[in-house]
Amino acid sequence: MGHYAYKMVETLNFEFKPVQESRLPSVDFNNIIFGRVYSDHMFISDYKNGFWNDFRIEPYDYIPFSPGSAVLHYAQSVFEGLKAYKSPSGEILIFRPDKNFERMNLSARRLCIPEIPEEVFMGGLNELLKIDKEWVPGLPGTSLYIRPFAFALDEYIGIRPSETYKFIIFTCPVGAYYSKPVKVKIETKYTRAVEGGTGFAKAAGNYAASLYPAKLAHEKGYDQLIWTDGKEHKYIEEAGTMNVMFLIGDKLITSEVGDSILSGITRDSVLTLANEWGVDIEIRKITVDEIIDACKAGELKEAFGVGTAATVAQIDTIGYEGVDYKLSAMEDREFSRKILQTLDDIRTGKAEDKYNWVYRL
């Protein structure tokens, strides 16, 4: 399966309805707000009678469906997020799409959504980007964000898996997700996910549940939350919508993935590079107390979130029990800055892709 990251499905029989007039000339690529500008087309497939079929690429537009659609009432929906980049020579490069395909189906299985065939996910992505390749920005710090998602369509008010679904891929040119280092609060009341739940899946409902506690944190001046376990609020899990990493002394420490923690593709990429560089890595449960103790002792050199949207989101301040702990200056953070630069160079074709992470369109 993994070979599709480098030799993606070249053809998929589909219908193509082009836009009458592209919106591309109206886009200011020097001032792109993340997630607000959408490319011209989207790929669509419908699931009915036991198969994914009716493959088509159409103009990006609103989707008509019934008020009784199951997704609106029971949140049977999963999604992914990945990015395409433009190399200095103008090549279109997609970062690790095979891993997004794997995780999409891991999420789908958990929510009783039929798995997306490889040729549909990879082939649809390939054909869509061929058509909308001019939408991939080339300025530093920009990329084309790709959002595949699948959701239930049955017009049925009752708790059971839907029998019909829609799979869509759309894209949008984006700039930086965070414009500055973030101030986070360790959450000790509300829970993002628990063992046995859907925290390991990219399920829409996970994010809806996080909105209220995040809103409360924003009202107190924080940009995001550091989530803790749902049983004791004793262990660190994620930071906002990202995996979180800490450099304490010379050790890079991050939480184990499991039922309640998403297995991030950026996380895996960071750990792979860190291992190559000989960094001392610990993947284990991390207590809140040890992070706060490291803050007090001045031993927490770096703290940062890792994810597709931001790649590396620097944590400037950690708040806990009414006390804010200011971390080291950005210019002193050698490891996370090196990670960000290295990943950026690999994704844009400026550095050797020794792990075969990049697919060239």
Image: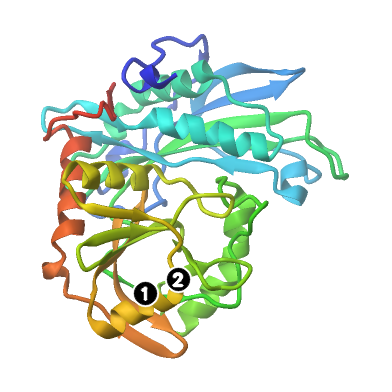
Residue 42 position, x and y percent, is: 48, 30
Q: Quadrant of residue 333?
A: bottom left
Camera-side residue of 211 and 44: 211
Camera-side residue of 333 and 294: 294
Camera-side residue of 234 and 135: 234
Residue lying furthest right: 158
Numbered mark located on residue 291 in the image: 1
Q: Residue at x 56, y 20 (%)?
A: 117
Classify residue 169 as left or right of residue 184. Answer: right
Which residue, given by chain and number where applicable, does mark 2 sit on? 287
Residue 345 position, x and y percent, is: 15, 40
Give how far apart the Cα atoms at labels 1 and 2 are: 7 Å
Classify residue 344 as left or right of residue 12. Answer: left
Quick check: marks 1 and 2 in contact, CB under 8 Å? yes
Circle 1 crowding by C-alpha within 10 Å: few under 14, some 14–19, many from 20:
some
Residue 230 position, x and y percent, is: 61, 67
